[in-house]
Amino acid sequence: MKVLLFSMPDVIPHIAKRQWEAPNLGLSSIAGNIDGRHQVAIADLVVRQWSVPTSMRRCLKKYQPEIVGLSAMIFQYFTARKIARWIKRERPGTLIALGGYHATTMYQELADSPESEVLDFIFHGEADHAFDELLDALEGRRTLESVRGLSYKQNGVFRHNPSRPLEDVREISLPDRDRRVYGGYHFYFDKTDVMETSRGCLLRCNFCSMNQMYGTSFRTYSTDRVLADIQAMYRRGVHHILVADDNITLDVPRLAELCDAIAALKHPNLQFIIQASSAGIAKDASLPRRMADAGVTQVFLGIENGSEANLKQMKKGKIVGVTQTAVKRLIDAGIIVAGGMITGLPDDDVASIRRNYEFFVEMGIHNVLDQIITPYPNTEMRQELLSDGLVTNPYDYQWYNGYWPQVRTRHLSSKELLFARWKAKRDLVGVWRADGEFQRNFPRWSWFWNNVLRNIIILNERRMLWMYGEKGRFKRQMKQWAQLNDYFGDMVVDEDFFDLDSDGPESLGNSGTERDFGAPPRMDSANKPAFVSTRDLRWSRRLGGTDVKTGEPAPTDSARVDAV
Ligand code: B12
Ligand code: SF4
């Protein structure tokens, strides 16, 4: 069959538009596991943001797909459904499948919504093998009913097959990056790609969607497979790699050995960004050095907050001390630290928000990646915020990307929260400078940024403040950022939300959109998380673990996962 896979173009305001444009790994993994008799093309629309409709039209014309697959996180679904409608209009016979995080966490609600009219298939969970099974079914070699993790239509109504057990990662072939139709992926203009060395996480941070995909589990790829993947990318001229693992530091000895094996490849200029937990990094004093030797130049640390009370609210544990240790050791090893921050917790006020930024700045974090707590569907955090009456936009998910506030705190309205965060970041972090490790790792880009772009931005900001004042500047910038993902020229934004002198709407989202997005998430009306009780138990059994609801040791296929 002819298959065309699209990832969505939507980006977030705080990862500057042209700074980082990475391919979607999930789609390459699906392509790598599809039988060779099918023709597969992958179009990552993130590298065609300025011409989405034209690029799609060209792809449809060139590849004449019989089935189109769309990959979307929650905030990207808004664009995905427009694309689905658009394809059905342009090429009515084309089948459309939706997969990824939004489909996985909300497949039943999506199936019940009017929007499901344009969808033929919804995948919940991993689809490395499931998509190939669907193609088999469409060619009559098996039944649709036998494809686990698939929802399909029968007489116009969606039927949901049982969820899929977690894949045995030994049976997942390497991603096929040759199926991509575009090039130009980059990180600060270095050619970039994405890989994984493990899947899953054993922690239970209550705002995270991840366990709805993998349950509470941790599966690791073999060192040979990881090295083969790196070699394949290196041969393609990729020297900069994002490791997509949720928490690569769960098994510290494995990570250290993996680093040694990568260092032994002796590939010059190989650079990695990894995501890690502070506790994992702090566990072994030799780890940052071994990571640096392997080429790890940047670590994204899930720090989230400097307040013990806020950390407790997010079920992050008491990590302030280990965070300080981890950050210091990484900086000492010459590694850039990008600190993930979550703000806007129920008891936050202007002072506590500013204290949190100070905490990050004092530690010497190079890059503060700040998000406002977001009530992602079917997460425990959403339940808590809803029952405390703090969610101001429960259903208009296009704004659920961590930048825009979907909540208020006990002291700040959503609008005040957005402004407090905007101002704290400007006052305390300021216009970022590419210093130290950044300069060493990206010398040309750092020079251009520090000497040219940064000065232009500072001058422009001064001019804007002089012309419009602080509130005016805030309003203009927010309006511009809110329209960042308007690829079809039809996005409606209520500007009053950014006007600090007007009472304005309570949130940026449209409260009338519930019906567009289907029923409220299942957990919104349930006492118990239905999702966890059915799927996680099945996954736990398959992996030989115990009931995740009891809090017993979680399932893993790695024998020596450190206590977390
Ligand atoms: C890497 C990553 C990123 C990278 C993205 C780079 C890139 N192009 O890949 C970066 C760091 C930039 C990033 C940023 C963000 N991310 Co992110 N990210 C991830 C992460 C850790 C891994 C994704 C990945 O590659 N997984 C490995 C591949 C193999 O799996 P996969 O993508 O899930 O694909 C499988 C299935 O989903 C399915 N599938 C996927 N697409 C499709 C399509 C079809 C047709 C089918 C059939 C199946 C299918 O099959 C695939 C194979 O099994 C996930 C968490 C996770 N573990 O998945 C979060 C995650 C996806 N991110 C998330 C979020 C919220 C964000 C941000 C909004 C956060 C923020 N505010 O900063 C931004 C938005 C980025 C943007 N677009 O501007 C959330 C999504 C929540 C949700 N409910 O939608 C996740 C789940 C993290 C979390 N802990 O909650 N992210
Ligand atoms: S450590 Fe990261 S991946 Fe694991 S549960 Fe917490 S936020 Fe999610």
Image (spheres, helix red, strand yellow):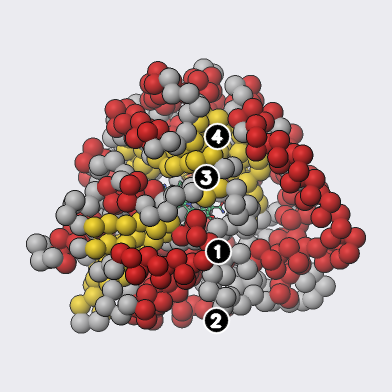
- Would you say the beta carbon of the disc 3 residue lies within 8 angstroms of ligand 1? no
The first of marks 1 and 4 along the sequence is 1
Alpha carbons under labels 3 and 1: distance apart:
16 Å
Left or right: residue 342 compared with residue 252: right
Amino acid type, mark 3:
His
Mark nearer the viewer, 3 or 2: 3
- Residue 212 seen in the current view: no
Disc 4 secondary structure class: strand
**Image vertical order of residue 98 relative to residue 119, above or below:** above
Observer-nearest of 545 and 468: 468
Alpha carbons under labels 1 and 2: distance apart:
30 Å
Numbered circle sitting on residue 512: 2
The first of marks 3 and 1 along the sequence is 1
Which residue is painted at 54% across and 39% down in the image? Answer: 190
Disc 3 secondary structure class: strand
User: Where does residue 145 sit, x and y in percent of width and height?
Assistant: 16, 66
